[in-house]
Image (cartoon, rainbow, N blue to C red):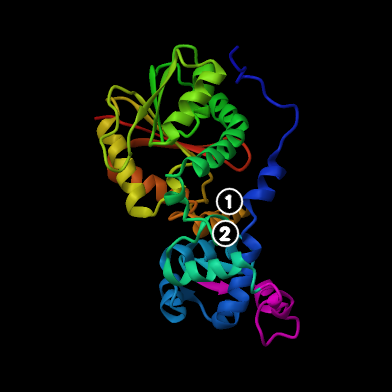
């Protein structure tokens, strides 16, 4: 019996998503206070990200995430890329202030996640999954069947709600075949075809996730409309013949060069007149928030090679690849979709 993927819950689970998504934000603040003394260092200056990276010997990607988070928290102001302390940051996070709360965080400095964040800031390399000593970094761990099953199940249960919000946001009546790139269990592909009766879909996944996807799609009753193609999105060409591409919660796992590469491959493979959907959590164009997205970016920065990209960054990558008519549309639980057309 097919699962009804058009049936939505009666309540909004946004806070439950935020509890988990924002888990690393406090450790990022602790690392900045106890490992870098960042706010004392900034002091009365206006200073750029590049100057902060050079002075504190930290890397660009994690520094970008950190500074965006503290701007969203209200501790920093961002004046066209020059950062300065807000009154709140100056009063409560500078070591010489009589109201400094830095020592209140000192007892947390040896938390494994806090240590990992400092290491990521200094090296730019992701930590082991969930800071577990016996676990590998996320991308490598996904090659193991046990981890892939666990991780895909986690993303699947998240997607049951988020995919419906995405499907209800979009009019896909003009499109016929969706390619869900790195689509995990296929929950997004199944939900989109459930809401759009004329749509078929293909989920592109590596081994061993391809087998997980096939089983999940079959259990939901969508095998007649959703197929699975096996392939590595970086090493092999994308399947052709699709007029709709989806990256859902994919680009945030990768650094800027890989994100640009994937968007370019989509443009090259997408049928003329087709559309690309980038469903994710997006930082605003000015990198001042939203806070829940900036907090989630701290988690991604630590355990993957990526971060939450800003709307301006994604639109720039789309334009460079040749895409046109970008649109930003909020969906649910702090997520959004950026769409763009391939108009060769």
The residue pinned by badge 2 equals 132
In the rendered image, residue 190, in percent from the top left (x then y), is placed at 51, 22
The magenta stretch is: 83-108
Q: Secondary structure at mark 1?
A: helix
**Picture residue at 64% right of the left edge, 69% below the top:** 111
Q: Is residue 257 above or below residue 49?
A: above
For the residue pair 145 and 30, the one nearer the viewer reads as: 145
**Picture residue at 52% right of the left edge, 51% below the top:** 283
Q: Is residue 341 above or below residue 127?
A: above
In the rendered image, residue 252, in percent from the top left (x then y), is placed at 46, 48
Q: Residues within 10 Å of mark 1 (few under 14, many from 20)?
A: many
The residue pinned by badge 1 equals 293
Would residue 102 be counted in the magenta stretch?
yes
Which badge, 1 or 2, is on the more N-terminal residue? Answer: 2
Q: Residues within 10 Å of mark 2 (few under 14, many from 20)?
A: few
* Disc 1 from disc 2: Cα separation: 24 Å
For the residue pair 176 and 113, the one nearer the viewer reads as: 113
Would residue 304 be counted in the magenta stretch?
no
For the residue pair 329 and 307, the one nearer the viewer reads as: 307
Q: Is residue 189 above or below residue 232?
A: above
């Amino acid at each position: 019996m097919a699962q009804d993927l058009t049936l939505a819950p009666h309540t909004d689970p946004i806070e439950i998503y935020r509890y988990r998504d924002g888990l690393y934000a406090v450790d990022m603040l602790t690392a900045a206070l106890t490992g870098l003394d960042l706010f004392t260092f900034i002091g009365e200056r206006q200073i750029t990200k590049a100057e902060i990276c050079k002075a504190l010997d930290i890397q660009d990607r994690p520094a970008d995430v950190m500074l965006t988070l503290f701007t969203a928290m209200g501790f920093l102001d961002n004046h066209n890329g020059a950062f300065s302390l807000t009154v709140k940051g100056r009063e409560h996070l500078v070591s010489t202030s009589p109201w400094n709360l830095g020592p209140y965080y000192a007892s947390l400095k040896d938390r494994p996640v806090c240590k990992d964040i400092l290491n990521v800031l200094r090296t730019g390399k992701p930590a082991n999954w969930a800071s577990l000593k016996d676990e590998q970094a996320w991308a490598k761990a996904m090659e193991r069947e046990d981890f892939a099953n666990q991780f895909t199940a986690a993303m699947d249960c998240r997607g049951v709600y988020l995919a419906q919000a995405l499907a209800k946001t979009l009019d896909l009546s003009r499109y016929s075949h969706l390619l869900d790139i790195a689509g995990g269990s296929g929950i997004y592909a199944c939900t989109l075809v459930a809401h759009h009766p004329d749509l078929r879909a293909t989920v592109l996944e590596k081994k061993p996730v391809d087998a997980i996807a096939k089983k999940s799609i079959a259990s939901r009753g969508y095998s007649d409309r959703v197929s699975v193609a096996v392939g590595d999105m970086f090493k092999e060409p994308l399947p052709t013949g699709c007029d709709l591409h989806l990256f859902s919660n994919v680009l945030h796992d990768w650094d800027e060069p890989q994100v640009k590469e994937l968007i370019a491959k989509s443009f090259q493979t997408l049928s003329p007149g087709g559309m690309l959907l980038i469903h994710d959590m997006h930082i605003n164009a000015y990198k001042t928030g939203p806070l829940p997205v900036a907090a989630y970016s701290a988690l991604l920065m630590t355990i993957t090679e990526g971060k939450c990209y800003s709307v301006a960054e994604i639109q720039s990558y789309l334009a460079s690849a040749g895409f046109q008519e970008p649109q930003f549309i909020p969906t649910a639980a702090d997520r959004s979709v950026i769409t763009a057309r391939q108009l060769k």
